[in-house]
C-alpha cells in the first residue's frame, strides 16, 4: 500500500470526526438588515432541495450552493426534473428523464441499459459529472455505479464549471440525483408495466412513521425481458431502504442504502461503421435491430451495494452543520463481441461484400468508493451586508481493480449474420489496481445587500493522489485551486439577472512518458436572466456562457499528450410552468459553438469535436381533464430536436439532425391509474451520433410502454 494512503486515511478519520467539533463555530448575531431567504424543509412541496417537486416547477436546489437555495439565486444555470415529470416521460433510466433538459445530450450512443451516457455543454459528464445526494458517483473505464430512476425523488442539472463546490468534476456541468427518503407521511404505492419489446417491470414505494422520532421508506423495482435488438435480454433488480431518525429537537440522521443487480445479453445497434448506417453501403443499410455479438458468449453481470448517511445538527442562532458519507462497492463482469469496421477496408466494404470485423472483448472490474463531505453553515452581519457562510471539508476515494482483455474475433456478415463459430480467447492488455484519492477544503459566502443584490464568492483547494499498480503502472499527485464569483439582483417583479466567472479542474487518469497526466483545467464566464413571476407558477431562464477546457488529451491512446484545448460557448433557454392545475409545460433550447482551439493535429483546430450536436430543442405539454366526460384523463406529448453532429474531428462526415415525437395518454381515478407512453412515436430510424467513422450508434426506435399504478 502506498505510504500516502496512511496519511489520507488519517485525513479521512479527521474529516469524519469534524462534525462534533463544529460547535466551535457558533456565533451570536442580531437580525440582519437584509436577509437571504431561508428555505423551509417541511413546507410546500419543492421548497427544499430534496423535497418532492410540485408539478414541473421546483422552488429550490442544493446543487448550486451545497445548501438549500432558491434556484433563481444560484449564479449558474440550473434545471430540476421532479418525480412527476420523470413519470410523465415513462423514463426507466436517468438519461431518458433528461432528454428534455437544455444543454444535455442524453443517450448519445443510443440506448444502453447499464450506463447513463450524458454530455453537458459539449463535454462528456458520464465519468466525473454524476452525483448522488451531493456525493460523486465517479466512474472510470468499466468501473462505477448505476442508479435506477425509480429510486429518485428528483434529478438536478447544474450547468457549467462547479469544481469550487465539488472538486474534480466535468466542466460542462453535473447531474445530482436526489434519493427518495422518508417524509413522515404514509406512502403505499405499487406499479407494474410492460413494453412492446417484451420487458416487464414491477415497482414499489412504501413509507411510514415507525414512532414519534423514526420514519422509514423502501423503494425498489425489478424489470426484465427482451430488448428491441436481436438476442438482447436484460434483468434489473434494485431496492433502496432509508431511515430518518430525529435524535433530538436539533439533530437528524438519515440513513440511505441500496442494492442493485443487473444481468443480461448486450443490445445491438452500436459500434457500427458510418458507411452502412448514416449513409448507404453498396449492400444498403445495416438493420437497426441487428446484433453482431455471439449470444452464447455474451454476458453482463453487475452486483452493487451502497450504504450512506446524512447527519444534520442545528446549533441555533443561524448556525448548523451537516455530514454526509457513503461507502459503495460494485463488481461488474462483461463479455461481448462488437464490430469494428469492414474486413480489410474498415471504412467501407470491398465491392460485393458486407463483412464486418469483430473484437472479442471481456473485462472484470471491481470498484470500491468512499465519499465524505462535512460542512458548517451560518449567518453573520457586517454592517449593511448579510452573510450566509459555508465552510466544508470533503474526501473521495476511488479504487478500481480491473482486468481488460481482447482478441480479434471472427468476421460476420452485416446482412446475413451466422453465429456460433469458436472465438479466440481474449488476451489481457490491462491488469491493474488503480486508486485515486481527493481531499478538498472549501468556503462560500453569499452576501445580500442593497435591497436586492446577492454576491456569491467561493474558493476551494484540492489535492489529488493517484496510484496504479500492475499493467500499466504509474503514480503521482497534484493540487489545484478553483474559485467562483457571482453577482445577481432580484427585482420585486421576479426578474433576477446574474453573472458569474468560475475556474475548474478535473483529474485525468493515465500517464505518458512525462508522467501522470495533469488535471484538465479551465474557466467559464456565464451571464443570464431568471424570471419567477408572481402571476403564474413558473420559472423561465436564459443563460449565455463561454467555457474553455485546457490540458485536453490528444493523439492515439498509447501516445497521448495534453496540449489540447476545447472552447464551448452558447445560449440556453428553458421554461418550466404549471400553467394551471391541469396544464403543465416544459420547453428548452440550446445553441452552442464548440471548437477545438489547440491540438497536436493542426488540421482539426477550429473544428467541432465528434458526437456533439450544437443545436438542441424540445417542448412537452401535459393536460389533465378535471371535469366532464373525460375527467381523470391526461394527454401529453413532446417534440425533441437534436441537431447534426460530426463523425470525425476533421468535420468531413456529418450525422444528420433528427426530430422525434413522444406521446402520453393516461387515466387516474381515486387511488389507481394507468399510463400509455410512446417514445419515438413515428419509429424514426436515425443515428444518435458517431465517435469516429468506425463507431456509430442507432437511436432508440419506437417504445410503447403500458404502466398501471395503485396506492392505498
Image: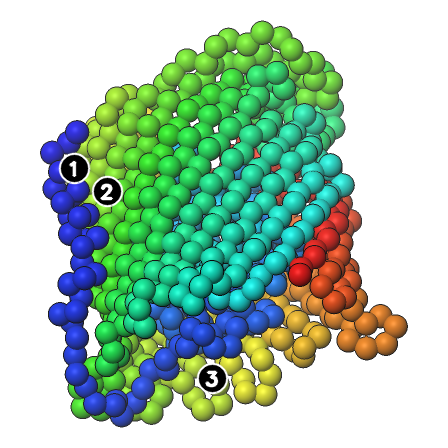
x then y, percent, for residue 117? 50, 44
How far separated are the C-alphas under marks 1 and 3?
50 Å
- Say whether marks 2 and 1 touch (CB < 8 Å): yes
Closest to the observer: 104 or 383?
A: 383
Towards the viewer: 342 or 438: 438
Q: Is residue 659 visible?
A: no
Q: Helix, strand or loop at disc 1?
A: helix
Q: Residue at x 88, y 72 (%)?
A: 629
Which circle's residue, 3 or 2, is located before the other in the chain? 2
Reading the image, the residue beneath label 1 is 5
* For discs 2 and 1, the disc positioned in front in the rendered view: 1
For the C terminus, the quadrant is bottom right
| Above or below: residue 92 compared with residue 355 | below
Residue designated by label 3? 495
User: Do we see residue 52 in this rendering?
Assistant: yes
**Alpha carbon distance from label 2 to label 1:** 9 Å
Image coordinates of residue 681 in percent, x first then y, are 76, 51
Task: Identify residue for label 2.
Answer: 437
Is 223 left, or right, of 163 in this rendering? Answer: right
Amino acid at each position: 500500500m502506498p505510504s500516502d494512503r496512511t496519511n489520507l486515511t488519517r485525513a479521512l478519520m479527521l474529516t469524519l470526526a469534524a462534525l462534533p467539533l463544529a460547535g466551535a463555530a457558533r456565533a451570536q448575531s442580531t437580525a440582519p438588515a437584509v436577509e437571504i431567504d431561508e428555505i423551509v424543509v417541511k413546507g410546500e412541496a419543492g421548497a427544499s432541495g430534496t423535497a418532492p417537486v410540485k408539478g414541473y416547477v421546483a422552488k429550490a436546489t442544493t446543487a448550486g450552493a451545497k445548501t438549500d437555495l432558491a434556484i433563481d439565486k444560484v449564479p449558474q444555470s440550473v434545471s430540476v426534473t421532479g418525480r412527476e415529470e420523470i413519470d410523465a416521460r415513462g423514463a426507466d433510466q436517468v438519461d431518458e428523464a433528461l432528454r428534455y433538459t437544455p444543454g444535455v445530450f442524453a443517450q448519445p450512443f443510443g440506448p444502453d441499459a447499464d450506463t447513463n451516457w450524458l454530455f453537458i455543454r459539449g463535454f462528456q459528464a458520464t465519468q466525473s459529472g454524476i452525483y448522488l445526494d451531493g456525493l460523486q458517483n465517479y466512474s472510470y473505464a468499466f468501473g462505477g455505479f448505476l442508479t435506477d430512476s425509480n429510486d429518485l425523488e428528483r434529478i438536478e442539472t447544474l450547468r457549467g464549471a462547479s469544481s469550487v463546490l465539488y472538486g474534480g468534476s466535468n466542466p460542462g456541468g453535473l447531474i445530482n440525483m436526489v434519493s427518495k427518503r422518508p417524509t413522515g407521511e404514509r406512502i403505499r404505492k405499487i406499479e407494474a408495466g410492460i413494453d412492446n419489446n417484451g420487458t416487464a417491470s414491477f415497482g414499489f414505494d412504501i413509507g411510514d412513521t415507525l414512532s414519534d422520532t423514526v420514519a422509514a421508506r423502501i423503494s425498489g423495482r425489478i424489470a426484465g425481458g427482451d430488448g428491441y435488438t436481436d438476442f438482447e435480454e436484460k434483468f434489473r433488480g434494485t431496492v433502496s431502504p432509508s431511515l430518518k431518525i430525529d435524535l433530538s429537537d436539533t439533530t437528524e440522521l438519515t440513513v440511505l442504502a441500496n442494492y442493485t443487480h443487473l444481468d443480461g445479453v448486450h443490445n445491438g445497434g452500436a459500434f457500427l461503421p458510418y458507411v452502412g448506417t448514416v449513409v448507404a453501403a453498396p449492400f444498403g443499410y445495416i438493420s437497426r435491430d441487428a446484433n453482431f455479438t455471439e449470444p452464447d458468449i455474451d454476458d453482463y453481470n453487475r452486483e452493487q451495494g451502497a450504504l450512506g448517511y446524512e447527519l444534520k445538527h442545528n446549533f441555533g442562532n443561524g448556525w448548523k452543520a451537516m455530514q454526509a458519507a457513503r461507502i459503495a462497492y460494485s463488481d461488474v463482469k462483461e463479455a461481448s463481441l462488437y464490430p469494428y469496421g469492414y474486413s480489410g477496408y474498415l471504412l467501407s466494404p470491398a465491392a460485393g461484400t458486407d463483412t464486418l470485423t469483430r473484437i472479442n472483448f471481456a473485462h472484470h472490474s471491481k470498484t470500491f468508493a468512499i465519499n465524505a463531505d462535512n460542512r458548517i453553515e451560518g449567518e453573520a452581519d457586517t454592517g449593511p451586508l448579510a452573510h450566509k457562510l459555508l465552510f466544508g471539508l470533503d474526501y473521495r476515494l476511488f479504487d478500481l481493480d480491473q482486468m481488460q482483455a481482447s482478441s480479434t474475433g471472427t468476421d460476420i456478415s452485416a446482412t446475413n449474420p451466422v453465429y456460433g463459430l469458436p472465438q479466440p480467447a481474449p488476451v489481457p492488455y490491462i491488469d491493474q489496481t488503480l486508486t485515486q484519492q481527493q481531499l478538498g477544503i472549501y468556503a462560500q459566502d453569499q452576501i445580500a445587500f442593497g435591497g436586492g443584490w446577492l454576491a456569491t464568492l467561493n474558493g476551494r483547494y484540492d489535492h489529488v493522489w493517484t496510484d496504479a499498480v500492475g499493467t500499466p503502472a504509474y503514480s503521482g499527485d497534484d493540487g489545484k485551486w478553483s474559485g467562483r464569483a457571482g453577482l445577481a439582483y432580484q427585482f420585486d417583479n421576479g426578474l433576477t439577472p446574474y453573472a458569474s466567472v468560475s475556474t475548474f479542474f478535473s483529474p485525468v487518469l493515465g500517464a505518458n512518458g512525462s508522467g501522470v497526466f495533469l488535471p484538465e483545467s479551465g474557466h467559464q464566464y456565464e451571464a443570464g436572466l431568471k424570471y419567477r413571476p408572481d402571476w403564474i407558477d413558473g420559472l423561465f431562464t436564459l443563460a449565455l456562457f463561454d467555457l474553455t477546457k485546457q490540458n485536453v488529451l490528444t493523439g492515439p491512446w498509447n501516445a497521448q499528450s495534453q496540449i489540447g484545448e476545447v472552447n464551448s460557448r452558447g445560449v440556453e433557454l428553458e421554461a418550466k410552468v404549471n400553467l394551471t392545475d391541469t396544464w403543465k409545460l416544459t420547453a428548452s433550447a440550446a445553441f452552442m459553438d464548440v471548437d477545438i482551439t489547440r491540438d497536436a493535429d493542426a488540421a482539426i483546430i477550429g473544428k467541432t469535436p465528434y458526437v456533439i450536436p450544437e443545436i438542441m430543442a424540445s417542448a412537452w405539454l401535459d393536460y389533465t381533464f378535471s371535469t366532464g366526460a373525460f375527467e381523470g384523463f391526461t394527454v401529453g406529448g413532446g417534440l425533441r430536436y437534436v441537431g447534426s453532429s460530426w463523425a470525425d474531428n476533421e468535420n468531413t462526415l456529418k450525422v444528420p439532425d433528427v426530430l422525434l415525437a413522444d406521446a402520453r395518454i393516461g387515466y387516474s381515478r381515486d387511488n389507481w391509474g394507468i399510463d400509455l407512453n410512446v417514445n419515438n412515436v413515428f419509429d424514426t430510424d436515425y443515428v444518435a451520433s458517431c465517435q469516429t467513422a468506425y463507431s456509430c450508434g442507432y437511436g432508440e426506435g419506437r417504445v410503447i410502454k403500458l404502466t398501471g399504478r395503485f396506492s392505498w
